[in-house]
Image: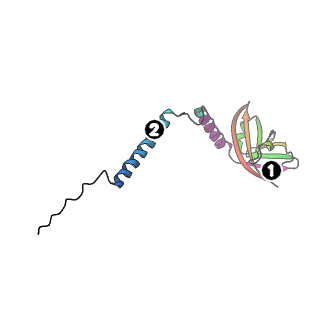
Amino acid sequence: MTTTTLPAPAPRGMPAWMIILVLFMGIVGIANGIFVWLSSHGHRDLVREDYYAAGLKQDGVIARNAAAGSVSLRRDGSDWLLEAAPAAASATGCRLRFYRPDDGRADRTVTMRRAAVSAERETWRGPAAQMRRGQWIVTAIWDRDGVDVSEKSLHLTEP
C-alpha cells in the first residue's frame, strides 16, 4: 500500500497582518499629506506686525530701568514721596503710573513735582488718592522735556 500525500493548498490572498500594515501605512501617508497641505496653505504671520519696533521699545525700557538707580516710594500724609538716586536728577518731570494687576479700571497716573535735590537724593512729591487694598505695580518715569529718560518699577502693597 502506498500512501500519497496531497499537496498543501496554496494560500489564498495576503495574510491579515499584511493587509492591516498596508492600511495603517496608507492612513499615515494620507495624514502626512493633509498636514503638508495645511502648512503650505495656512496663514503664516508673526505674532505682531511691529515686532521689531516693539523690541526696540523694550530695549529702551531696559536701558531706562538701568539708569534709574535706587528708588523708594512711601506715603507722607496725603502725598506720595519718591526718593531717587541722583541719576534721575537731570529730569525735568516725573510721573507715577499705578497699575492694578487684577483690575485695569483702577489704574491711574500721578504727576509729581520736585520737592528737594541734594548730592545723594532727589525727592519728588505728588498727591496720594485713596487706593484699593492689595497689590499694585508702580512705575516711576522721569522725563526731560517730554522724553522719558529713566524709569523704575516697584511693587506696592496697599493696606
Side of 45 where 70 appears, left or right: right
Element type where label 1 sits in the image: strand
Q: Is residue 6 above or below residue 1?
A: above
Quarter of the figure with residue 43: top right
What residue is rendered at 58% in x and 33% in y?
Answer: 52
**Residue mark closest to the camera, 1 vs 2:** 2
Q: Label for residue 33? A: none
Side of 50 where 28 appears, left or right: left
Check disc 2: other Cα within 10 Å, few if <14, some if 14-19, many if 20+: few
Q: What x and y, as percent, mark residue 143?
A: 73, 35
Element type where label 2 sits in the image: helix
Q: What x and y, as percent, mark residue 151?
A: 70, 41
Side of 70 where 3 appears, left or right: left
Q: Label 1 amino acid? A: Arg
Does the magenta segment cover residue 17?
A: no
Query: How many discs mark residues in the rendered view?
Result: 2
Is there a contact, CB below 8 Å, between mark 1 and mark 2? no
Circle 2 sits on which residue? 36
Circle 1 sits on which residue? 74
The range drawn in magenta is 53-78
- Precedes in sequence: disc 1 or disc 2: 2
- Real-space CA distance between mark 1 and mark 2, rounded to the nearest whole angstrom: 59 Å
Q: Is residue 24 above or below residue 1?
A: above
Check disc 1: other Cα within 10 Å, few if <14, some if 14-19, many if 20+: few
